[in-house]
Amino acid sequence: MINQHTENILNQPVKTTPDTGYRFSWFDWFCLWYPPGWLILLNRHWQHYHSDPDGWNWLEYILFLIPGGYYLALLIRWLRLGCRSPRKEVGEFNPRYQQAFRNEILAPIIKYYFRGNLQQIDNLPQTGPMIVAMNHAGMCFPWDFISLGYLLSEACGWSVQPLANVSLFEHPWMIWWLPPKWSQVLGGVKANIDDFEVAIAQGKILLYAPEGIRGPGKGWQKRYQLQKFDVSFMQLSDRYHIPILPVVCIGSESLHPWAINIKKLQKLIKLPFLPISPLMLMLLLFPSMGVWAMKTRLQYFIQPLEKNINSGKNHTTAYQQAQKFREQMQNQLNQILSIDSNLP
């Protein structure tokens, strides 16, 4: 059984663990293939295992599916909560809930929608703490990260924790989309140097994007062109003697195609990036599509483990090594694309 003990700031009782796991119903299949329903999938699963009186209800879910209905659902929920924001719970990473979410929600999405698969699996190490470094793209909800975490856990039994942008934890829009602390309970680690270092010191398996926000924010015109790598992952790998597992992802650029990033507008609303594309018209009509992405085929090519990281004693040496690492991944990416020109 899955058991999660989470108390919110008012110490409201937590729902007892259900006798059965979450079952993917006909309504869930409908939501999977109808883009405005993806937000319903994520919230319904949470509510199956948690008492969440501040969460969305069935009337509001139905409104999600109607053009413009999300705005009415948001107003109804705000009035229902007494004209306040949802309460923020105190949540900690729960591997058992992560496993339940992975098996009951991510499995059908990744297998049947993103068709994710691992290539060159002989390069996978047996176990141990490591930094899994992947090219991150798509200008959308981080499905390329989430899919890789799922596939690695299926193949190796690992409990993978992604390094996630702070906005996935703290942005005011997120608490109206997803349950408070949802990212944290599922294992997300805030993408700041302090939290990153603590996680590395604890010997976790971390999923990391060396490009940072520059990767997904670069836009469609620079697809499959790796941006400058940060140096922190090289320095921490060296300091704590933790190897780096490079992974090249193909298909992530098509999660939100034809997009450009308007930096001034992005900074105004305090989002890591704001994709402007033809799909934005649909997002305005159906804001619940904010967690949706275009159907694509996500392929992950596992590279040999990098064990002997020596970032040097100064920032310049670490920077040079990080960019050399980027060049190696770019060469691998180019080779893969040239072998199969039919890849997205």
Image: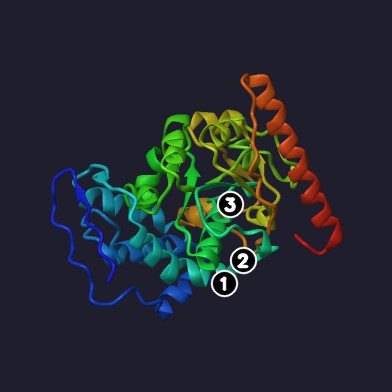
Residue sitting nearer the eye, 265 or 229:
229
Assess whether mark 1 and mark 2 are in contact (beta carbons under 8 angstroms).
Answer: yes
**What is the three-letter code of the residue carrying label 1?**
Lys
Image quarter where the N terminus lies is: bottom left
Residue 281, numbered label: 3
Dot 2: what SS? loop
Q: Position of residue 217 (x, y in %)?
A: 63, 39
Dot 1: what SS? helix
**What is the three-letter code of the residue carrying label 2?**
Gly
Residue 111, numbered label: 1
How was this image coloured? rainbow
Q: Is residue 172 visible?
A: no
253 relative to 90 in the view: left or right: right
Which numbered disc flags the more N-terminal residue, 1 or 3? 1
Q: Which residue is mark 2?
A: 116
At label 1, counting other C-alpha atoms closer than 10 Å, the crowd grade (few under 14, some 14-19, many 20 or more) is some
Q: Position of residue 71 (x, y in %)?
A: 39, 52
Dot 3: what SS? helix
**What is the three-letter code of the residue carrying label 3?**
Leu
Q: Position of residue 35 (x, y in %)?
A: 52, 64
Which numbered disc flags the more N-terminal residue, 2 or 3? 2
Q: CA distance from mark 2 to mark 1?
A: 6 Å
| Picture quadrant of residue 95 | bottom left
268 relative to 320 in the view: left or right: left
Residue sitting nearer the eye, 41 or 243:
243
Q: CA distance from mark 1 to mark 3?
A: 28 Å
Residue at the outermost bottom position? 26
Q: Position of residue 309 (x, y in %)?
A: 64, 36
